Amino acid sequence: MKTRITHLTLFITCFLALQQAWAQTATTKLTTAFQKFEADAQMQNGIASLYVVDAQTGQVVYDRNSNIGLAPASTMKLITSISAYELMGKSYRYETKFALRKNGKQTSLLITPSGDPTFGSWRWPETSEDAVLKGIVQAMQRAGIKTVHEVVVQNEGWNEETVPDGWMWQDIANYYGAGAAKLNWRENQYDVILQSGKQIGEPVSIVKTVPSLNGYGLRSELTSAAAGTGDNAYIYFPVGTSTAAIRGTIPVNENSFKISGALPSGTNQFVSMLADTLRTLGISMPQQAVLQHSAIPQQGYTLFHTVLSPPLDSLVYWFNRKSINLYGEALVKTIAYREGNTSDTRQGLSKIRQYWKDRGIAESELAMVDGSGLSPLNRVTTHAQVQMLLHARHQSWYPGFLASLPTFNNMKMKSGTIRGVKGYTGYHKAKDGREYLFSFLVNNYNGSASSLVKKMYVVLDELK
């Protein structure tokens, strides 16, 4: 027995010594690589933070500026994802309910949404606009409805501000700046097909939008640029008018160049498209809905159809894989709405901060103003991000969360990009079998993003 204990003690001692040696090796390599990175000309006026821990032990492998709050860009989505898993559950589904009320010869359609960002999305067969509209129409036909005189959307508890604090004017009319409402449709976006001129400087014309827009116009102030210059077109929401301007450039000799914009009202677009679909079947319905912000008595209404979203686990997959800002804002609003009587983004973020404060992450490390990272006003620490990644590894929903992370530089990590900001946060298993959790944020760099990314990869390669 004494010999066995001695052998076991020796094994443990050697194992721990080996672990320590591995950690020292990784730490030494990262220290050298990061010092070189900080000394680079692109970081002359910038700041960077890198925090790395061992996934098995939680031991800190490298720490530089981990307690400094920095703009995280889309790496913020990992905070929102993990928080949503914890506060909503991986099986959570949104519901959009449809009910009818007949009052004499008058028929009212009541739509009760719940903030579903996947309603009408093309990412799942069952959520596509064709599938959703078909299901509603068939349900109305079964109910024997020939005419709808009024459409009411129950908007109780959902504030009218779909865009959170700090989003830029240049962003909010474009597809990635679509805000979250209680009733969203087609991820609140549409496509614009453009035709450029044959010569540089010639005007660009609008061919069409998909779908056709309801009560909202566009005008092109675009010009044609050199071939290969790509998409430099931005849509700007109008002030005091219903027509938006598209400014910037697209390349010459383009006959069907596509950009995507944010719908000013997903609710109006959905009601309009439903009315158009019903009209082809001889059922009349108004093109506009009445938004009701106070409680509507349910007496007299008969529920006839419910549209369910995919489960949260599936939603998070696309949220992180395609970095869909709308999903992040919808999740934060939902967290607020489920635990109170408002969808105010600030309340949702407060709930998230409190949740992590109870688990050892200071509220000051999560100075967030949105759920997607699009706002340049966000400030979070790499320490907080990594602590959440460490927490996630021990949860039942971890496999789905890990699957949601894209692969960059042969590493499972979420990227983040806004002007002057680049970040990577995620997991990596090295060749020697060790697994690392890391967050690497850079703010206020100069020069090209592509050049900076290559230099960030050089640092992260030390984990391989």
Image: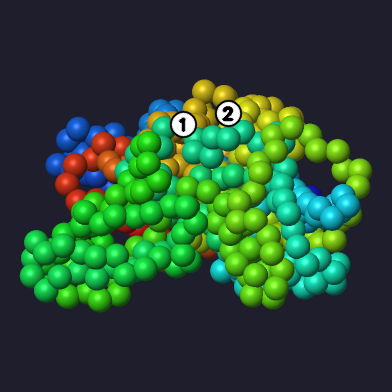
User: Is 238 situated above or below 318?
Assistant: above
Residue placed at 39% from the left, 60% from the top?
260
Q: Is residue 183 visible?
A: yes
Question: Residue 195 placed where, x, y %?
Answer: 24, 70
Question: Residue 24 placed where, x, y %?
Answer: 42, 45
- The disc, 1 or 2, on the residue closer to the chain's N-terminal end is 1
User: Is 290 situated above or below 464?
Assistant: above
Question: Quadrant of the rendered structure where residue 256 is?
Answer: bottom left
Q: Would residue 84 be found to the left or right of residue 42 on screen?
A: right
Question: Quadrant of the rendered structure where residue 442 is?
Answer: top left
Residue placed at 78% from the left, 67% from the top?
146
Q: Which of the image's four quarters has the C terminus?
A: bottom left
Q: Is residue 38 visible?
A: no
Question: What amino acid is at disc 1?
Answer: Asp
Which numbered circle lies on residue 165?
1
The residue identified by callout 2 is 346
Q: Are marks 1 and 2 in contact (CB under 8 Å)?
A: yes
Question: Quadrant of the rendered structure where residue 91 is?
Answer: bottom right
Residue placed at 72% from the left, 51% from the top?
150
